[in-house]
Image (cartoon, rainbow, N blue to C red):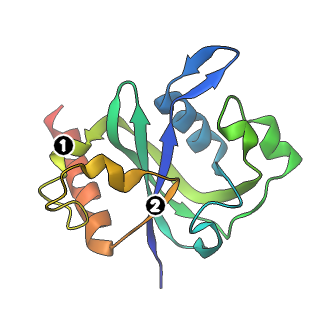
Amino acid sequence: MAEHWALIVRDHTYQGKTILARDVLADRVRNKFWSLNSRARNVRKLKEGDKVVFYLTSSEGRGFMGRGVLAGEAHPMTIEQRFHIIGSPSINFDYAVEFREAEMWPKLVPLDLLTDRMPLLLGRKNPARVFRGSIIRLTERDYEIVLETAEELMRER
């Protein structure tokens, strides 16, 4: 049975400059893999067919900006994958997981839109705190609510 996860991406720094989380995400979606720390909580639980949403924590805001389906388990990063990694913290990561499918949405789904909808966030004083770390387990319902909210937002264009 597929699990549901939020994969977290934050702004990176490279040679003293900021690389926005949305640009890091665009690169990961284009290259169809996600870099991970082998010591991250839940890294060994990721498996083929698991469904993920991408959560950004950035100077531009916090929220979700895409989805994907994992192609397999997390594993030591290949030389080819390492070639695509730019900036900190990702350059310190040693594991990766590939996507069978991955898409980035044109708009950020702000966390504020989800605080009263996602069971995971209900009643929390600081909902952003839930997304500390790099791999957060979601219930199927939480995952579906993110997708439904994203669809609503994209229709509003």
Residue 128 lies left or right of residue 21; in this view the side is left
Residue 98 position within the rendered picture, expressed as x and y whole percent measured from the top left: 66, 58
Please tell me the numbered disc located at residue 54. none
SS for dot 2: strand
Q: Earlier in the sequence, mark 1 or mark 2?
A: 2
Query: Where residue 52 is drawn, which disc sits there?
Result: 2
Q: Residue furthest right?
A: 79
* 37 relative to 100 in the view: left or right: right
Amino acid marked by disc 1? Asp
Query: Residue at left 13%, top 61%?
Result: 123
Q: Is residue 81 above or below residue 17?
A: below
Q: Which mark is residue 112?
A: 1
Q: Measuring 84% from the left and 44% from the top, which residue is drawn there?
A: 80
**Where residue 126 sits in the image (x, y, percent)?**
24, 49
- Residue that lies at the very extreme toward the bottom in this rendered image: 1
Instruction: Tell me the distance, in whole angstroms, between the alpha carbons under discs 1 and 2.
Output: 20 Å
Q: Mark 1, residues whose alpha carbon is within 10 Å: few (<14), some, or many (≥20)?
A: few
| Residue 113: percent from left, percent from top | 16, 45
Which of the 4 image quarters holds residue 84? top right
Circle 2 Cα neighbour tier, 10 Å, few/some/many (<14 / 14–19 / ≥20): many
- In the image, residue 54 above or below residue 121: above
Residue that appears at 36% across and 25% down: 60
Q: Which amino acid type corresponds to the residue marked 2 in the rendered image?
A: Val
Q: Judge whether 32 appears above or below 25 on screen.
A: below
